[in-house]
Amino acid sequence: MNPEAALLLILLSFLRGVFAQVPITALTEATAVEDYQGSGLLEVEQEDEIRDTYWSGTAPLCFGGCRGLHKELKKDNCGDSDCCWMGYKSLCRVNCGNPDVDFNGMVSGSDWWVGSVVRYDCRLGFVLLGDPAGACQSNGKWTPKPSCLRVCHLGRVEINERDIDGTCTSTCPDVKSYAVPLNHQCSRIENCRTKEPGWKGWFSRCNNCDCDCFIPCGR
């Protein structure tokens, strides 16, 4: 093979590798331009779902790296068994990042890759409402986090007005007519009374209410 032909072969392989770096998207429709429009564009078929994990980089000239929701899990010059002459391949996987947690809550777990599970807990004096386990989903988001509410004397729970009807007022609302939001897993709050705002409110911008303990649904 003469040098010109060898150089052309390397160039074609390089172009093939560049176009293979872009991960498959979640679009379900094929994009195309009709022949009669004279654009010369080729129809591009796209998969139904984003892959949670994939290798980026195509031999023989590999350019690794991840984009979007995916982060680089590891590097390898052979990767999925097709080795690179130059460069490396990246094993890309969905990563949800640091999970969000309430001010009075804690989260344990350092694995934030798709399918990973973390555990939520509340600081002393607070009760956890919601699922204590959080999971990293394929869309790059964690499942909804639980809430931490203060447990007061005589078995009462302190709740913010905003948690009752989504608004903030200067006085405690009459909550006997309100049903507690489903994410609190409760049926109704009774006998709410005004609580002094300030330091005891733990930096809350709204007045708080001392209310009877929640009644879990189904009991």
Image (cartoon, rainbow, N blue to C red):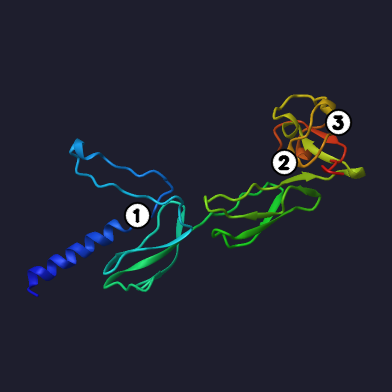
Where 98 sits versus 214, above or below?
Answer: below
The amino acid pointed to by label 1 is Val
- Is the residue marked by circle 2 packed among few (<14), some (14-19), or many (20+) residues within 10 Å? few
**Mark pair 2, 3: CA separation:** 20 Å
Q: Earlier in the sequence, mark 3 or mark 1?
A: 1
Q: Is residue 53 left or right of residue 201?
A: left
Quadrant containing the C terminus in the rendered view: top right
Secondary-structure class at tag 2: helix
Q: Residue 23 in the image: x percent, y percent?
A: 38, 55
For disc 3, the marked residue is 192
Q: Which mark is residue 183?
A: 2
Q: Are circles 2 and 3 on residues that touch, CB within 8 Å?
A: no
For disc 1, the marked residue is 22
Tell me the quarter of the picture where residue 84 sits. Answer: bottom left
Q: Are circles 3 and 1 on residues that touch, CB within 8 Å?
A: no
Q: Is residue 95 left or right of residue 28?
A: right
The amino acid pointed to by label 3 is Cys
Quick one: 157 or 132, which is closer to the camera? 132
Q: Are circles 1 and 2 on residues that touch, CB within 8 Å?
A: no
Q: Please tell me which residue is depicted at 40% across the width and 69% down the height of the picture.
A: 75
Q: Earlier in the sequence, mark 2 or mark 3?
A: 2
Quick one: 211 or 58, which is closer to the camera? 58
Quadrant containing the N terminus in the rendered view: bottom left
Q: Residue 206 in the image: x percent, y percent?
A: 72, 31
Give the number of callouts: 3
